[in-house]
Image (tube, rainbow, N blue to C red):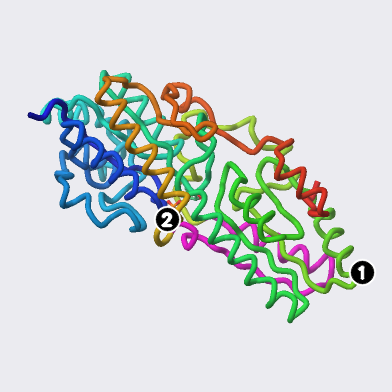
Amino acid sequence: MVKRFVGLLTAGGDCPGLNAAIRGVGKAALSLDIQVIGYLDGFHGLVENRYIRLDSTRLSGILSLGGTILGTSRDKPHKMPAGELGTVDMRPFAVANYEKQHLDCLVCLGGGGTHKNALRLANEGLNIVTLPKTNDNDVWGTDVTFGFDTAMAIATEAIDRLHSTAESHHRVIVVEIMGHNAGWLALGSGVAGGADVILIPEIPYDVAKVADAVLHRSYAGKRFSIIAMSEGAITQEEAACSDSDHDDDDDDEIPEGQIQESVSLRLARRLEELTGLESRVTSLGHLQRGGGPSPTDRLLATQLGTTCARYISEGRYGVMVGSQGGQCVPVSIEEVAGNRKVVPLDHAWIQSARLVGTSFGD
Ligand code: F6P
C-alpha cells in the first residue's frame, strides 16, 4: 500500500548526474512505499501538469546517462513566459496541480535559481525537498554539487590537450570555462591541468599583470602559456564599477537574454597587443555539461537521492540534502536560496596554485 506521493522535477541548466539522482530518489522511494511522478521540463511541466510516472521500468538503465530524462528549463513559476502577455505568475497553477495529484512533497533538483523558485513554492504551502546540482559548484550548504566533478574532468582534459598545440605553435591559449558567478570550475581544472594563469570572478584581474605573467614565461624560455578563464571573470576596472546596480531579483544563474560577448576573446586580443605573442581562444561551452557522469558524481547523486527519499518518508521537508564532510545533511532551503557559495580567497587550491607559480592576474 502506497503511503506517500511525490512529484520530482529538474530545473535550470542540465548536468551529468541528474539521472543518477532521479534514479536514487525513485528507487529508494519505491522501496519505502512512496510513489513518484516526474514533471517534464522543469517548473513548466508542473504548472501545465505534464508528468510521467517514475516506475521501476523508467528508473532502470539511466544511472550512467547524461542530461535529464525529464527535460529541463530555466522557467520560473512566478514569471512564466506567456507570449504577448509577457510573463505571468503561475504559482497558483503549480499549487493547484500539486494538490490535484495529492502530493505530499515536491522534489526539485537544481542550482541557485531553482532554490529561489523552490522557496517561493514552499512559501505557498508546498512541502519541498531539493538536491544540489550544477557544474558550477556554487550552491550554498553543500561541499560539492553533482555535475561539478564531471565538468572539472572534461575541462582538465581540454587544458591537457591544449598544452601540446600551444607549445608547438608558441601561442597563448585562453580557455574559457563555465562559471558566471563562481570560479570553482576554472580554478579546479586550472590547477589540475597546470594552467599558467587562472582568472576567476572572485579575483578581479589586471590585464597588464596577465601580460606580465605571459611575458615572464616567454623570457624564461617557455614559449607558450595557457590561461584558464571563467566566463564570469572580470577586470579590476569592471569590479570597481559593478555591484552598486546589482538586481536583487535576479534569480538566474546566468545573465539573461542573449549570447554574451566572450570575455576570452577580448582578453586574447588585448594580450596580443600587449605581448606581441600570437593568441588563440578555446571556449569549452556546453561540452562541459555533456555526456555521462563520472563515478564520483554517480556516487554523490545516488547518496543524495536516496537520502532525499528517506527524508520524505520521515516527513522532513523544507530542506536541501547537502553533502558536508562526506555525510548527507539537511540544510534549510531558505538559507540555500539566500546565499551563493563562491570561492574563498584563502581556499587551499588558490594557495597551492600561487605556490607553484600560477598567476591570478592580481
Ligand atoms: O548554471 C550552470 C551553467 O552551466 C553555467 O555554468 C553556464 O554559465 C550556464 O549554465 C549556461 O546556461 P545555458 O545552458 O542556459 O546556456
Q: Please, what secondary structure does the residue beneath circle 2 have?
A: loop
Residue 238: mark: none
Residue 351 vertical placement versus 167 (above, below) = above
Residue 293: mark: 2
- Residue 319: where, in percent of width, then height? 38, 24
- Residue 246: where, in percent of width, then height? 58, 32
Q: Is the magenta region chiefly helix, strand or loop?
A: helix
Q: Is residue 101 left or right of residue 164?
A: left
Q: Identify the amino acid type marked 1.
A: Tyr
For disc 1, the marked residue is 219
Tell me the magenta residue range. Answer: 260-289
The residue at the far right in this view is 219
Q: Which image quarter holds the N terminus? A: top left
Q: Nearer the viewer, residue 331 or 41?
A: 331
Res 103 → quadrant: top left
Q: Would you call the spot at circle 2 few (<14 residues within 10 Å), some (14-19), or many (20 or more)?
A: many
- Residue 197: where, in percent of width, then height? 75, 57
Residue at left offset 50%, top offset 45%: 255
Q: Identify the amino acid type marked 2.
A: Pro
Mark found first going from the N terminus, 2 or 1: 1
